[in-house]
Image: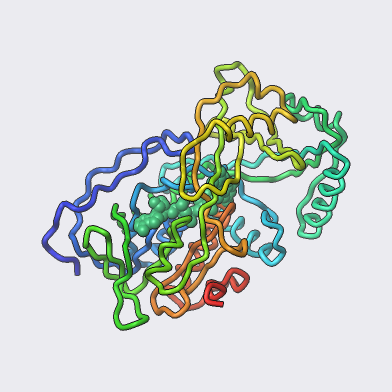
Amino acid sequence: MMCPSPAPLVVTRLPAGGGGGGTVAKQKVVEVVPKHLKADVAIIGGGVIGCLTAYYATLRGLKPVIIESDGIASGASGMAAGILTPYTGSGASELLALSKASLKLHVDLVKTLPAETGVDYGYDSRPHLRCVFTEDGAVRLKAWQKARAKEGFKSEWLSPLQAKSLSAWLTGDILGALLSEIEPTVDAYRFTLAAFTAAERRGAKLVIGRASGLLSKGKSKAAGVRLVDGSEISAPETVIATGPWAGEAGAWLGYPVPVKPQKGQMLYLDLAHGGQPKPQVSLGGFDTGGILLPKKLTETIVGATREDAGFDRAPTDAARKDLITKVSRFSGRIMDASIVRQTACLRPMPADGKPYIGRAPGWDGVWLGIGHWSEGIHFGPLTGRYIADMVVDDKSKYDLSAVASSRISA
Ligand SMILES: Cc1cc2nc3c(=O)[nH]c(=O)nc-3n(C[C@H](O)[C@H](O)[C@H](O)COP(=O)(O)OP(=O)(O)OC[C@H]3O[C@@H](n4cnc5c(N)ncnc54)[C@H](O)[C@@H]3O)c2cc1C
């Protein structure tokens, strides 16, 4: 039962426009909630992991509360490039089955979420060209092709002429390129918003506030979440999905949580006004870095930097120059395009390169969905589904031992 005396505590809101250039964001109505709420599951963090966990939890009949200190998808989940990798993006072979399972969940989700929520998140599947400029790069790319082929990922080696015939955007002096057929993308902001909207329609609530600790019954049984303003969400299960801020949960859990922020900056190109068509394929410099990523619903993306800058989220001139220089190696046309937006956000970088998913070591009723680094949009459905399964059934058909949260205490 909820406390009957409501206090004007919560304004439910979404970030204006979204980091990814989204225009779907609507200001939600002001929602007044009691100072003390009860939920089946309290989810800290309204990024892609928190929203998908809430969504799958509602499918299992639970009524979750998402606690978000800023706005839905206000972190990296609203600004990511949105690439879904049908192979192991990090190269860790033990993640292949998980990568494929999450992609399959994405394919299922796109059949229902946009229609159900009215949020088209621009699921798209274009070919991708990885270009090389050096002999060493060509050797490494061919080795990469071989390794991916073993994983069932199809690609074809192209001569410079063949590659250039596929896109007028490819103007650089390349030695060759690898063409892969299917590399899906979504608009990350809209995708997260769609997951949130679907969860909300099934009874999930959003509380805007900053979690400051766990409520506990005894030493190791969690009973919900305390917010900095003193309000409390009581819940038998709590999920920590706080992205790059996950390290703060160390103070709540009693041991270090090895996730830190990695800054990533991207540019958005306005091609329509320069009279340039969108690239037909996405292009990347395998040995030089840089990617040019046409998107179905938003401007073409130029990505992305990887910087160790703590929690700083300010866009910088240095990053803009770096990205333009990298992409201009394979596409001189970038020099004629105008940049309409520059974004900076934080990847949640785990100490050993893999996410931590599952029960928080030493705790009953606390779950971790953290450390998704460069692949949270891709892995979000699997993480959300797994945690919801575990909360309800204490088992899942998915084997996530490769990313088990027990690694933290080890
Ligand atoms: C430039 C860039 C490009 C990327 N491209 C891709 C890509 O192509 N494909 C892909 O799969 N991934 C990509 N990623 C990675 C992806 O964005 C992340 O892995 C993913 O968004 C992480 O989601 P999250 O929900 O864990 O964290 P976040 O999106 O950071 O969400 C965490 C939320 O928790 C909230 N929060 C934190 N602490 C508290 C607290 N104490 N109380 C309440 N709320 C709190 C924050 O406000 C935030 O909204 C990219 C990342 C970057 C930076």
Q: 86 or 368: nearer the eye?
A: 368
Report the residue that reaches farthest toward the bottom: 218
Q: Position of residue 171 (x, y in %)?
A: 77, 25
Q: Splitting the image into 4 quarters, where does residue 350 fall?
A: bottom right
Q: Which residue is pictured at 61% across the width and 21% down the height?
A: 337
Q: Is residue 106 above or below residue 356?
A: above
Q: Is residue 189 above or below residue 260?
A: above
Residue 409 at x, y percent in the picture: 52, 76
In the rendered image of this protein, does residue 135 appear above or below residue 154?
above
User: What colouring does the structure picture have?
Assistant: rainbow
Q: Is residue 314 left or right of residue 95?
A: left
Question: Is residue 168 among the parts visible in the rendering?
Answer: yes
**Residue 292 in the figure: left or right of residue 204:** right
Residue 255 sits in which quadrant? bottom left
- The quadrant the C terminus occupies is bottom right
Q: Nearer the viewer, residue 354 or 155?
A: 354
Question: In the picture, which quadrant includes the N terminus?
Answer: bottom left
> Is 409 displayed left or right of 72 in the figure?
right
Give the side of residue 1 with respect to residue 192, left or right: left
Residue under the image location 35 percent in, 54 percent down:
68
Residue found at the far left of this picture: 5
